[in-house]
Image (spheres, rainbow, N blue to C red):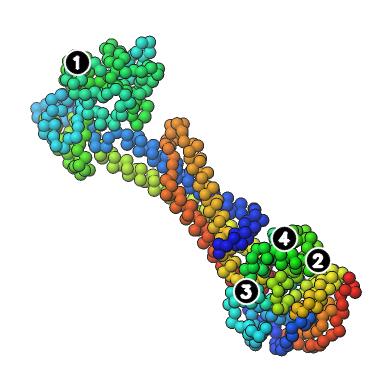
Amino acid sequence: MGSNSLHVLKGIDFSVEEGELVAIMGSSGSGKSTLLNILGMLDELDEGTYDLDGVPIKDLNETKAANYRNKFLGFVFQSFNLINYKSAMENVALPLYYQRVGRKERQEKALKYLEQVGLKEWAGHLPSELSGGQKQRVAIARALAAEPKVLLADEPTGALDSKTSYEVMDLIQKINDAGNTILIVTHEPDIADMCKRIVHLKDGVILEDKKVNQVRAAQYV
Amino acid sequence: MFSRDNWKEIFETIQKNKLRTFLTGFSVALGIFIFVTLFGMGNGLNNTFMKFFGSDATNIFRIYPSQTTLPYGGYKAKRRIEFYNEDVEEIVKEFGPLIQYISPRISRGASVSYKNKSDNYGTEGVGPSMQFAEKTIMMKGRYLNANDIRDRTKFAVIGRMVEKDIFEGTDALGEYIDISGSAFKVIGVFQDDGGDNEERTIFIPYTTRQLIEGNNNKLDQIVLGFNQAIGYNGAMKFDKKLNAFLRNKKTINPDDPRGVRIQNVAENLKENQQVASVLKIIISGIAFAVIISGVLGISNIMVFVIKERTKEIGIRKALGATPKMITGTILLESVFITTIFGFVGLILGIVVLNFINGKSLEEDYFITNPEINSGTAIFVTILLIVCGALAAFIPARKAARIKPIVALRDE
């Protein structure tokens, strides 16, 4: 963990409207994960501004950042990042615990979102008892449980085979259809084609920003 | 911080990380357990020590006559000094207000028998005041009194073990025993904190002993209890004056190392207390070292535990946990574990101390009534809990402060 700084992003100017499904593409080292981490308040920006839902995100202390993350953002990671000693339902309920939602309501909501991702009957299972695709669906349910403004997915299909990837994308498209704003970092063109807009990054700048005709994942499932 | 949800979260974490919980708890319990047993043993050793030296009264002078080594006042050296009954009276006359009680003492071994049973015991020809000097406790009957001394009665006060040995459980009171050929009536049975040996003694009037030995008036020893109000310094001064008085009276060279000797228990007591306190300091030091190593053990485990949980902390932060919530949960968890296991260790230690308490321990290892006072035990347990909390708090706070992205990258 070196502390020497490195300029990764060199002038990014773009905005995302509510209800969009954006793919951020680029080769490794292009700065796409860094961009997503800044958007997710997991990392800090050195210069520039970032507004989320009309709120300027700056000078955050950890507590404030935690509250914003909890209120505005849902995360889906490439390596799932489920807590391995908690069941699927408990994992999904965790962001609600940090929102101080009551225990009963938490469980009800967690079950509701697990049902939405098709895993209701797996609620009591530990992550180690689930397949990769199931784990990612639990992670998506967890990201949805807090009812965030934006869903941020960092290579959500990176650790999955193509069939499972399409299943996960199908789920993400359905969630987007329901009105949720979603940003996906990916380096797979077929995954990017399933979004509504593709932003190409290269060496820290935007190379291309275009709307595309969405390919529905359902046809491959 | 104390909501039901929070506890639920903690119990879940504990339940699902049994090995980790056990390791932390074990080091806490072991630390407390070792401390309690060690400290208890130390106290036991101290108790034995105090029992050896503390069973008799502490305000006592024992005055012995012996052979002179220097010629003085026209007498040759190697003269045998003897005490007589009138010496006691003169000491009282001279030092009256300084004296609480005084008793002559004539010690003789004797064969004692009752019916078919007989055994050898020490007999002590004494006055009534000897009861105070020896801290003799009457179980039944009475001690010797002034009338017994005056009338030279053939009465005997026997120890509990004497009654047990030769009366074999039957009541000795009022029975006649044979002491070296003379019949004595048992008028009392006593017990003594000094142990079995002191309870194998028979007290008879010193005048009776003198009568048996040819109606003389010689004494072996004079036991004197000084007035405790005069204090340690007063006792030392009294010791010197009494010594000078007796040397003058018996015409003994003041520089003669022998002739007359006053054993001053006050002086012994001071030395004994010093030894006992040094013993205590050593034991406390060892016990303290054990606690320190226990605390270090806990800290070590805590650092490891939190290192292991860095990724989990990152996930929790990404889901919206504030640093405060994270440190709070980890802190509460560690305090909970140390408290539970601390008291387990405490109780185990106390159980072991009670279990090993016994005669063989006392006789073979000089440990009497190993114990720990509840104040010390609870203080140490709380100390360990506080240290455990601190040991968890510092790395937890550090972990809660790192950026979630760094924590998430941790594999």
Which numbered mark, 1 or 3, is in the foreground of this view?
3
Estimate the spatial distance between the alpha carbons at disc 3 and disc 2, rounded to whole Å: 29 Å
Mark 4–mark 2 contact, CB under 8 Å?
no
Q: Please name the amino acid that badge 2 sits on.
A: Gly
Find numbered disc 1 in the image and state the secondary structure of the residue it sits on: helix
Estimate the spatial distance between the alpha carbons at disc 3 and disc 4, rounded to whole Å: 23 Å
Residue B161 location (% of width, % of height): 37, 23
Find numbered disc 3 in the image and state the secondary structure of the residue it sits on: helix
Q: Please identify the quarter of the rendering in which residue B106 is found.
A: top left
Q: Which residue is mark 1?
A: B211
Judge from the rendering whether residue B342 lies leftward or rightward of residue A28; answer left or right. left
Q: Please name the amino acid that badge 4 sits on.
A: Ser
Q: Earlier in the sequence, mark 4 or mark 2?
A: 4
Judge from the rendering whether residue B120 lies leftward or rightward of residue B29; answer left or right. left
Q: Which residue is mark 4?
A: A87
Q: Please name the amino acid that badge 1 sits on.
A: Leu
Q: Which residue is mark 2?
A: A118
Find numbered disc 2 in the image and state the secondary structure of the residue it sits on: loop
* Figure quadrant of the C terminus of chain B: bottom right
Instruction: Work out whether residue B330 can be spotted.
Output: no
Mark 3–mark 4 contact, CB under 8 Å?
no
Mark 2 surroundings: few (<14), some (14-19) or many (≥20) residues within 10 A: some
Residue B278 location (% of width, % of height): 36, 46
Pick the residue in front: B247 or B23.
B23
Q: Earlier in the sequence, mark 3 or mark 4?
A: 3
Please determine if labels 2 and 1 lie on a single subunit.
Answer: no
Q: Residue at x 64, y 84 (%)?
A: A55
Q: Which residue is mark 3?
A: A66
